[in-house]
């Protein structure tokens, strides 16, 4: 039986479709609400594309790095602190895509699904964010960089908290220079936080990876000796060394950063073993620091000639290293094989005083070093400082470390990676100064200045 | 059973008080939001008085007790007034005047719909009038926001297509005298095609889509023929594809669909802002007048839903839009017991139109459907839209048997709407279902709806199938009579239209 009124029941389909649409809409708001709210077009938070109303960002000592007053973002009153913390805090216009003001803008605005940005409108402030960074140490680091480009970061390898994270060049976010886009020499990559986004040729610091692979795979590595005549012939080419080291054993080779010896070790290991170790250390794996994306360190020697494998073993091939990644490796060695992830955003404080933890001690499962190898590496890196760089370079710090001087077009990057062995100062450090000279004299000096302040 | 539930359990007085409280609260915010505004105060006072006067007169003098739709209409229109008042107080008065006009249309339509003989006579004039209005629109209109759907007469802009909506349903449902005959369907098809075509020429694709959807409801409810409907849909899709193929600029209008963030400051501006600010409002809202979506172009007309979400909160926004589906549920329910297919179809089509239009608006601004710029019924700023929305309510309400308590609930062979809404048998061998016999006189005082027409069949009704219906003169015992008639008139005289009309004029 058909009849008109019965046919009205097809309208139930319309109603069901309508509710399905509503459900989909609400799902969209639930999932994307915070992303939509932090769009630059949202005039509740941004004025003319610049962040205007948001919460305060504090350093670990409660120093205000930036806050909102009458709809204007006001940065720390010390110009050097402003520059030193620029990449951590971020700028007004969201050019610095890894800065807290961009990445955590929905948190800073106090957005939540139930209240929207009501708290921001009512109290004219959103949620506050506490960083683990120390503004004074960052300032020291910025000054130690002395106008050179590069990055330095120090973190507590037991907790993961970064105390210093500086990337240069930087600018003053309160008074953004007008020539920032024209002056490409001075402000090259100024919006990049080199610590998380930078990728550098590692140079000799890559010998740490080769050494780890050697300890893992060559049982008699400590009893082997290597001849260094200033160069090493691989048959299809030669590796140039930084000096003539004569006959050296494994430890001495690392101390002197002997290219001939490490090229031989790399060839002895072969492509596969070296790739495997690099993979275990987290190369070629995407990483992130909470919501901040970190560039991926890359290592690939699968299709190399012998001489290129030799160069790769000493960090001069196509290998690229990210400072955040290498710092994690140093922390893992220092922390007896426990890879603690660095973080710098401590927590968020709601207007009512409630806090929500953001950064916490987490293990990075992609960086795998056994405690046995970690303790051997510790000894080797300590011996570098004791026997070669000298403790007087890092007075009182009991540093372990490795320098690097990565040859690139137009100069060499000065590297220093290491950590303090002192029980009361569990800090690991990474420093790279672009095209500035040799690792120890340039990066070593910057590291010393910063570590002195961190550890004392 | 279901009638009783509708009839007696709904305490409209209590609901009216709640609606008034809501309006006083929200109105107070609007009036005092930017310093005390005496003009707005007057608008609100007038509006609330109008509301109460309507309810009191309708309940005491017109015997009405089914106020569900009016309550929704007044509640929504009030929300609309508040929403536009905080943008610019001059809008509020215009909006309130539109509600008064809408109410006039509502009452007028209810009166007309009661007189089905007049409905039948008006059918053709209305159809020609509607097409004429669209032609006048096309001739006079100037481009306005990419569409030609506005004309300005004496300084007042009106949107003729809004009024044609009422005519469209009216004509569609009323072409039922020769029920399911091919000729009436053809005529209606031509009329529908004319309307949709004119809207396409105006580039008002949203309204064209609404008309098409309404056409589908009417055509399906009339014929029940899934194949025909499928054919029409396929033809429409092919037509749309052809338009896109030959006129790529039409397709370009919808290029932002699902890509609004790529056109964030151009074509996607309204949708992205709606999403941004609706999310900013959260579930509870930022407060009436505290939003920023209002600054976006055409916010109070196109983006009313977003404004409500941002300022009043998404919960209220959701409740409003869910209520549109309740209107349709109501229509389906009253269509079950209504007097004839005419009322059933007009109610379902009107309610379906309201829900579909609301969906196009809500899902258009949130980028779930393409953005077409149709209004949110009752709430968006715009007089024509308000008036036509109230007209829809009248079409739905007229299907509710409680609306005309003194009217006989059955339809006799000499009635213009005969046969009634129920058809028996398979396609091709259809017979009209003859109204049931009512043994008891209808009790007008409580409600004539006590006897559901479509559900009760008495034993005697089954005997009649062998008599050709068209030839059959109603036997005296088959004639349902109202109580008065039963007392005064001899039982063998069929109850005529005249006697009903005479009483209606009293």
Image (tube, helix red, strand yellow):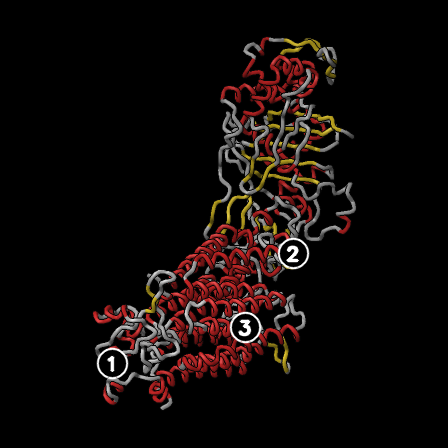
B435 relative to A431 in the view: left or right: left
Mark-to-mark CA distance, 3 and 2: 26 Å
Where is residue B198? Give x, y as percent: 60, 68
Residue at 52 percent of width and 31 percent of height: A424
Q: Which residue is mark 3?
A: B162
Q: Residues within 10 Å of mark 2 (few under 14, many from 20)?
A: few
In the image, A93 versus A68, the foreground residue is: A93
Instruction: Decide if residue A82 is in sight here.
Output: yes
Where is B70 relative to B356, above or below? Answer: below
Mark 1 falls on what kind of element? helix
The residue where tag 1 is placed is: B476
Residue closer to the observer: B440 or B299: B440
Marked residue chain, label 3: B
Question: Are labels 3 and 2 assigned to the same chain?
Answer: yes
> Residue B251 occupies which quadrant of the picture?
bottom right
Q: Residue at x 49, y 65 (%)?
A: B215
Same chain assignment for discs 2 and 1: yes
Q: Quadrant of the N terminus of chain B?
A: bottom left
- The residue tagged 2 is B252
Q: Earlier in the sequence, mark 3 or mark 2?
A: 3
């Amino acid at each position: 039986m058909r009849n008109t009124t019965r046919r009205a029941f097809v309208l139930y389909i319309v109603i069901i479709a309508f509710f399905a649409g509503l459900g989909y809409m609400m799902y969209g708001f639930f999932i994307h609400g915070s992303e939509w709210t932090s769009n630059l077009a949202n005039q509740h938070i941004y004025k003319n594309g610049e962040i205007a109303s948001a919460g305060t960002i504090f350093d670990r000592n409660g120093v205000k790095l930036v806050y909102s007053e009458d709809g204007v973002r006001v940065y720390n009153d010390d110009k050097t602190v402003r520059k030193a913390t620029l990449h951590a805090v971020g700028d007004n216009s969201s050019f610095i895509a890894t800065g807290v003001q961009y990445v955590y803008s929905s948190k800073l605005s106090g957005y939540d699904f139930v209240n929207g940005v009501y708290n921001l409108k009512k109290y004219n402030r959103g949620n506050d964010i506490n960083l683990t960074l120390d503004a004074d140490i960052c300032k020291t680091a910025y000054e130690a960089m002395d106008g050179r480009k590069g990055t330095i970061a120090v973190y507590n390898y037991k907790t993961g908290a970064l105390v210093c994270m500086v990337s240069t060049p930087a600018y003053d976010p309160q008074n953004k220079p007008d020539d920032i886009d024209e002056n490409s020499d001075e402000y090259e990559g100024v919006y990049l936080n080199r610590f998380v986004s930078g990728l550098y040729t590692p140079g000799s610091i890559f010998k740490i990876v080769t050494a780890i692979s050697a300890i893992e795979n060559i049982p008699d590595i400590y009893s082997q000796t290597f001849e260094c005549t200033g160069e090493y012939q691989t048959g299809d080419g030669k590796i140039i060394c930084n000096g003539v080291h004569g006959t050296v054993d494994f430890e001495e080779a690392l101390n002197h950063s002997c290219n001939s010896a490490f090229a031989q070790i790399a060839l002895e290991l072969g492509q596969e073993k070296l790739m495997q170790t690099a993979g275990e250390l987290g190369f070629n794996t995407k990483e992130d620091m909470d919501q901040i994306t970190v560039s991926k360190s890359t290592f690939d020697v699968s299709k190399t000639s012998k001489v290129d494998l030799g160069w790769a073993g000493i960090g001069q091939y196509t290998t690229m290293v990210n400072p955040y990644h290498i710092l994690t490796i140093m922390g893992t060695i220092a922390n007896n094989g426990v890879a603690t992830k660095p973080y710098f955003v401590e927590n968020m404080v709601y207007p009512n005083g409630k806090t929500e933890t953001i950064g916490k001690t987490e293990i990075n499962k992609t960086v795998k070093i056994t405690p046995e190898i970690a303790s051997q590496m510790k000894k080797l890196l300590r011996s570098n400082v004791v026997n070669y760089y000298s403790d007087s370079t890092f007075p009182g710090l009991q540093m372990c470390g490795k320098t690097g001087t990565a040859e690139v077009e137009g100069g060499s990057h000065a590297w220093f990676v290491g950590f303090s062995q002192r029980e009361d100062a569990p800090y690991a450090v990474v420093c790279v100064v672009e095209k500035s000279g040799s690792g120890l004299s340039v990066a070593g000096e910057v590291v010393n200045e910063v570590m002195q302040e961190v550890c004392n | 059973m279901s009638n009783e539930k509708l009839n007696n359990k709904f305490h409209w007085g209590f609901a009216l008080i709640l609606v008034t409280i809501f309006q006083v609260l929200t109105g107070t915010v609007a009036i005092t939001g930017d310093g005390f505004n005496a003009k707005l105060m007057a608008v609100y006072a007038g509006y609330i008085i109008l509301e109460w006067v309507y309810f009191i007169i309708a309940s005491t003098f017109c015997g009405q007790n089914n106020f569900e739709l009016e309550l929704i209409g007044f509640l929504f229109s009030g929300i609309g007034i508040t929403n536009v008042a905080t943008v610019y107080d001059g809008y509020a008065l215009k909006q309130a005047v539109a509600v008064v006009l809408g109410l006039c249309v509502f009452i007028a339509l209810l009166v007309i719909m009661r007189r089905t003989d007049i409905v039948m006579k008006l059918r053709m004039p209305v159809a020609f009038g509607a097409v004429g209005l669209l032609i006048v629109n096309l001739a006079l209109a100037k481009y306005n926001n990419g569409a030609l759907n506005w004309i300005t007469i004496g300084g007042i802009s009106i949107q003729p297509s809004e009024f044609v909506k009422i005519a469209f349903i009216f004509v569609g449902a009323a072409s039922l005298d020769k029920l399911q005959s091919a000729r009436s369907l053809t005529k209606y098809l031509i009329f529908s095609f004319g309307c949709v075509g004119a809207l396409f020429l105006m580039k008002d694709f949203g309204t064209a889509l609404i008309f098409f959807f309404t056409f589908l409801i009417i055509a399906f409810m009339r014929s029940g023929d899934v194949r025909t409907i499928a054919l029409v849909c396929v033809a429409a899709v092919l037509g749309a594809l052809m338009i896109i193929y030959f006129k790529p600029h039409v397709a370009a209008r919808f290029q932002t669909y699902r890509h609004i963030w790529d056109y964030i400051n151009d074509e996607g501006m309204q949708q992205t802002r709606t999403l941004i600010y609706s999310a900013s409002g959260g579930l509870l809202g930022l407060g009436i007048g505290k939003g920023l979506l209002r600054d976006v172009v055409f916010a109070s007309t196109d983006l009313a839903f977003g404004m409500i979400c941002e300022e009043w909160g998404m919960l209220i926004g959701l409740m409003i839009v869910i209520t549109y589906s309740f209107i349709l549920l109501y229509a389906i329910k009253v269509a079950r017991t209504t007097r004839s297919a005419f009322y059933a179809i007009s109610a379902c089509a009107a309610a379906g139109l309201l829900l579909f239009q609301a969906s196009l608006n809500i899902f258009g601004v949130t980028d779930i459907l393409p953005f077409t710029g149709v209004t949110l019924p009752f709430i968006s700023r715009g007089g024509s839209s308000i008036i036509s929305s109230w007209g829809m309510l009248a079409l739905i309400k007229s299907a509710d048997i409680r609306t005309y308590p003194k009217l006989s609930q059955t339809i006799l062979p000499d009635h213009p709407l005969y046969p009634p809404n129920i058809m028996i048998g398979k396609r091709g061998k259809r017979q009209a279902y003859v109204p049931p016999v009512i043994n008891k006189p209808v009790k007008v005082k409580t409600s004539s709806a006590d006897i559901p027409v479509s559900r009760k069949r008495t034993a005697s009704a089954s005997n009649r199938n062998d008599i050709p219906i068209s030839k059959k003169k109603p036997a005296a015992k088959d004639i349902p009579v109202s109580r008065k008639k039963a007392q005064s008139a001899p039982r063998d005289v069929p109850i005529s239209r005249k006697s009903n009309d005479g009483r209606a004029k009293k």
